Image (tube, helix red, strand yellow):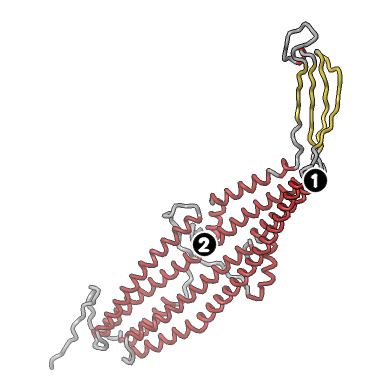
Amino acid sequence: MTTHHQPAMRPLNGGPACGPKAPGHAPGRRARDLLFVLLAALGPSSPVVAQEAALGADLQGLLAHARAQSPELRAMQAEADAAAQRVGPAGALPDPVLRVELMNINNYGSDASPNLLPAKVGETKYTLMQSLPLWGKRDLKRDAASADARQAGARSDAAWAELAARIKATYAEYYRAAGNERLSNEVLSLMARLEQVSQARYASGLAGQSDAIRAQLEQTAMRAELIALDAEKWQIKARLNALLARESAAPLADPQVLRPIPPLATADAAALGERARARNPLIQAELARVAAAQNNRDLTQRNRYPDLTVGVSPSQVGSRITTWGVMLEMNIPLQQESRRSQEREAEAMVAAARSRADSLSQQLVGDLAVNLAGLEAARRTEALVKTQLLPQSELSLQSTLAAYENGKAEFSMLLEAQRGIRKARQEILKSQVEAQMRLADIERILGEDL
């Protein structure tokens, strides 16, 4: 009796030839082993975090680096320090003025020749004068400068809140790109195993060669996707390095973990809105502007009243002080129309500052409610996918694999089931990143971390 051997098939990717299966390694058992590998590869993964994480591995390291190195933040802090230094001088008295008058420098009535020395002229008069702003004007100037300093400090805090929010959002995008890359590499490795199974089934006469071809096409598609993901990662890294004041090509470790999401819901909008009104640096800057405008308005109204200048005047004849005098000087505020215009201008500036503060407060509280709704939706989506869609996709894969074992399902159905699990994992990652970005916006509005 002539024995016919199934010819070995040369794999399409140029790998080693696959012959008939050895005893004890039936395709059904190989497929069940593949199921375990598949679910392990596509199941939830928890990256191992090094004890000393490199820059980029976690968010806190990035924020600490940015706070220490950001030139924009240093500039805002320097401006705030400069504004704080203007508070003291704003309420100080003006410098005194010394006036020296040389009288009868031609020495008329005497035999002396003209001279400019105080002891050799007819008379020298010294006047020491000091201006005295009254009616609380110095206090108002000091208060206005203090409000400007608070405004500059709040602007500095707002710059940091904005920078931190951008770093948090970019880090979340970086995590999503790195997670998709890991998932694509896992699927690529899985497709290589599926190709081996399909080649073994073809060699055993249990499937057609098209199954192996489909597996190789899927691998090619995954490699193309990895190229796109790698380009996306480099773009995100360049943006992140720019936010950190580093060279665009500076190395960054792959992100390992996301921050835990605090238990927030749309019902917390009112409480968080009040918190934002009390702590948001942009709102605080606008309130400081209101205070400065009010002080300037009050100061303009106090300019209706005159300021005083007092002085003492000793007179010198020869080398002796012979007489003393005192002086009192005041300005006369006669230009009332001009002052009324200044007062109306100051009043309009107060109204504008108040309206700007109210508008900003309403806008930020509205943005807060929007982000809370988005955060809650992202968390609910993640929970739904984890508890229902992902388990259902895994059951679908098990069913399809069992049918493929028995020749009742096409290889394309197995690929589709695998794609379902991958899509569910991507949806979980997308929901997690969306929640992180919403949290970053909420913390920017609040002006502090939760």
- Who is closer to the viewer here, 208 or 278? 278
Q: Quadrant of the N terminus?
A: bottom left
Q: Which residue is mark 2?
A: 58
Q: Are marks 1 and 2 in contact (CB under 8 Å)?
A: no
Instruction: State the residue at coordinates (54%, 68%).
Output: 437
| In-front residue for pair 204/443 | 443
Q: From what the image shows, is residue 63 above or below residue 24?
A: above
> How many other residues sit within 10 Å of disc 1, few (<14), some (14-19) or many (≥20)?
some
Q: Nearer the viewer, mark 1 or mark 2?
A: 1
The residue sitting at the top extreme is 111
Estimate the x, y position of residue 143 in percent, counting from the top left.
75, 48
**Residue named by callout 1:** 304
Instruction: Indicate the amino acid at tag 2.
Output: Asp
Q: Where does the image place residue 398, in percent across and percent down from the top left? A: 41, 86
Rendered-image quadrant of the C terminus:
bottom right
> x, y (%) of residue 396?
42, 87
Q: Position of residue 30 (x, y in %)?
A: 33, 83
Write the residue at 81% across / 34% down: 309
To which quarter of the image does residue 448 belong?
A: bottom right
